[in-house]
Amino acid sequence: MAAEIHVPELGESVADATVGRWLKQEGEAVKSGDALVELETDKINFEVEAEQDGVLESISKGEGETVNVGEVIGTIGEGNGTAPEQQEQQEEEDEQPQAEAEQPEAESEEAEAEEAGSEESNGHREVEDGAGRASPSVRKLAQEYDVDLAEVSGSGSGGRITRDDVERLIREQSRPAAPEKTEEPERDGKGASQPAASEDGRAALEERVRVSRRRQTIAQRLVESQQTAAMLTTFNEVDMSAVMELRRRRKDSFQERTGARLGFMSFFTKAAIGALKAFPKVNAELQGSELILKKYYDIGVAVSTDEGLVVPVIRDADHKNFAEIEQGIADLATKAREGKLTLEDLRGGTFTITNGGIFGSLVSTPILTMPQVAILGMHKIQERPVVVDGEIVVRPMMYLALSYDHRVIDGAEAVSFLVRIKELIEDPESLLLEG
């Protein structure tokens, strides 16, 4: 008996998902626990696994379709399964005796003459209509979508047309057609005719790639942030000499003792918490006519992945020591790049830190992670000449950027917040006093 494959619970406040890609094909054998399909939500991607052994009998929701929690997206039947191409070949072999049995015994002389045509002409007709190179299930799919099999290039053995070949052509035919060019010549602003633009063949050099659900959501949230908040950015620069010297002296013993690598993120996380305590409105959220001041410190750390930026959260960061912060960031970054983040890893966050410096960015204006009201941007450490006690010296300097919602935070407060971070980083021993 066939077992239905349902869309599982996706997490709090997540009602639907998009089918990313099927990891198994129809007719393929599966075992309990095998990943069947990858679903995309606004925040994470996750795999739906088989709950029993058998064969992937049917796929009812294709790539790019939106599905809801509990919806049936396919079925698993009993059996050992065969490779899709072998299954199509088997279907064709099973059909041949049936077709021969149904053929009328008596045929007209004209039909016999046609059948007695040369092997070369028969082969030509077969290639011409394509039907002889496709299994019954593939021919049925082509008929449903009005696909001419003669236009399909077979990628199977011996030029056989597979289901993937037909689906590829269906996707190509479903793309919006380019607007037809009018024969009437274009005219400039003065009424003079202009030569019509010629087809330069560049369309063949273009590739259309489906935008992932996460990337669409990121785009929507960024536009929402720009349109909602009165966003400004203020800048400062920090001398990294003291932190780099402390790190140089302590990183080996730190790693031996804690197992965590001592990086710069733990220093900036601690400095941000110290500044947030001094300026509580930066750790707030605006809801209508009320400002919610948050007295807990869940620090989001922006992580770049192949599918876009995600911001996992270090919860209660003010209660964690340097090693716990470094290990927490490392674990979340690994999960992000392996696609194993959970919704709980991404939920909430009161303040975000993003480090464009790892990609070589010298200065940038980060965009707010709504509904937060501020975000700190770190950048590349670069040796520059600076004046210290009346003398020009070379120091490792970093530009800092604080983007903030001017509806909540005044300019003076934003500048003072950034100056406080600068003070704590340039005197890293003071971070111990920030608890």
Image (spheres, helix red, strand yellow):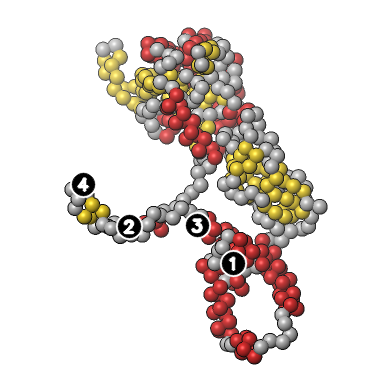
Q: Tell me: 190 left or right of 317.
A: left
Q: Give the residue number, with chain letter if any, for mark 3.
A: 172
Give the amino acid at mark 3: Glu
Q: Earlier in the sequence, mark 3 or mark 1?
A: 1
Q: Earlier in the sequence, mark 3 or mark 2?
A: 3
How crowded pointer 4 is (Cα within 10 Å; few <14, some 14-19, many 20+) is rated as few
Answer whether residue 157 is visible to the viewer in this image.
Answer: no
Contact, CB < 8 Å: mark 4 with mark 2? no
Q: How many marks?
A: 4
Query: Tag 2 or tag 4, which sits nearer the N-term?
Result: 2
Give x and y (percent) for residue 400. 39, 22
Dot placed on the residue nearer the N-terminal end, 4 or 3: 3
Q: CA distance from mark 4 to mark 3?
A: 37 Å
| Distance between mark 3 and mark 1 Cα atoms | 16 Å
Dot 3 and dot 2 residues touching (CB under 8 Å): no
Q: CA distance from mark 4 to mark 2?
A: 18 Å
Q: Are marks 3 and 1 in contact (CB under 8 Å)?
A: no
Residue farthest right in this picture: 1
Position of 195 relative to 346 (above/below): below
Label 2 sits on residue: 182
Cα–Cα span, label 4 and label 1 = 53 Å
> Is 73 located above or below residue 301 in the figure?
below
